[in-house]
Image: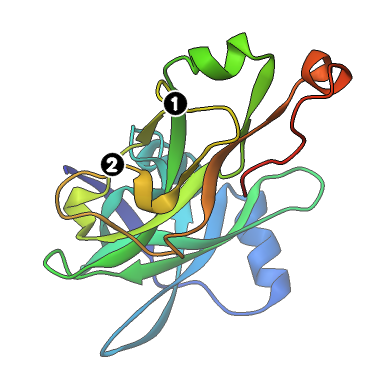
Amino acid sequence: MSQVTLNASTSREKGSSNSRRLRSAGSIPGVVYGPGISPLPISVDAKSFRTAVSGDQGLNSLIALDADGKKFLVMAREIQRHPVRGTVSHIDFQVVDPNSSVIAEVPLHVIGDAVEVRHADWEVDQQLFSLEVKTRPDRIPTHIDVDISDLKVGGAIRVADVILPEGVEPAVDHALSVVTTRPGRVAKTAGGPESVAV
C-alpha cells in the first residue's frame, strides 16, 4: 500500500474557541497518539486531509504525517463530524507499526446472482455492509467481495464463509451472518417456509 503525505501544525492552542477559529480558517484540529508517545495536539488543512483519504483505501489510508518536522506513520481513526453540516470537526490519528496488525473496517460488496433464491421468489437480505478485520496496514483490502451465487433458499453466509485475502482475518464473531435469505411476497402467500437463517 502506498503512503500519502500530510503536513500538520503543532502550534494549535487547546480550547473550543481556538478549535472554532481553526475550522473557520479551513483547518481541522486533531491529536496524534500511539504507544510510547504523549498525545500530540495538531491541526491539518481540511482540503489536504480530504485529498489524503480520497483514494481507494479511504479512511484506511496509510498517512505519512509531518508535524512540524516530527514524522509519524498514522491512520485516521476517530473522526468527529458536525451534527448538522457533516463536516469533519476533529480527527484522532493513531501511530501504527507497518509490521504489526491493526483493526480496520472494510466495506463488503455482494456479488453474483443467487439464482435458486430468486427462482423460489425468496430475497437476499444483506446483514453486514462492512467487516472489521485484523491485518498489517499495508494489507488492508479496499473492499471484500461476498459471492452469493451458491446461496440456497433458507441459507446464509456467515463471517467464517467469507473468503479473505492472505494475511487478513476477521476481528469479529465468525458466526455473524453477512447475508441471509427470506421469503418474498409470493412465497409468503403460497404458504412457503417462513424460517430465515440467522
Residue 25 showing in the rendered view: yes
Q: What amino acid type is highlighted by mark number 1? A: Ile
Q: Where is residue 105 in the image (x, y as percent from the top left)?
A: 43, 53
Q: Position of 20 compared to 176: left or right?
A: right
Nearer the N terminus, badge 1 or badge 2?
A: 1
Q: What amino acid type is highlighted by mark number 2? A: Ile
Farthest right residue in view: 189
Q: Which mark is residue 139?
A: none
Q: Position of residue 47 (x, y in %)?
A: 48, 39
Q: Is mark 2 on a helix, strand or loop?
A: loop
Residue under circle 1?
148
The image quarter containing residue 37 is bottom left
Q: Where is residue 4 in the image (x, y as percent from the top left)?
A: 24, 45
Whole-angstrom CA distance, mark 1 to mark 2, is: 12 Å
Farthest top residue in view: 119
Q: Position of residue 58 (x, y in %)?
A: 40, 41
Residue under circle 2?
163
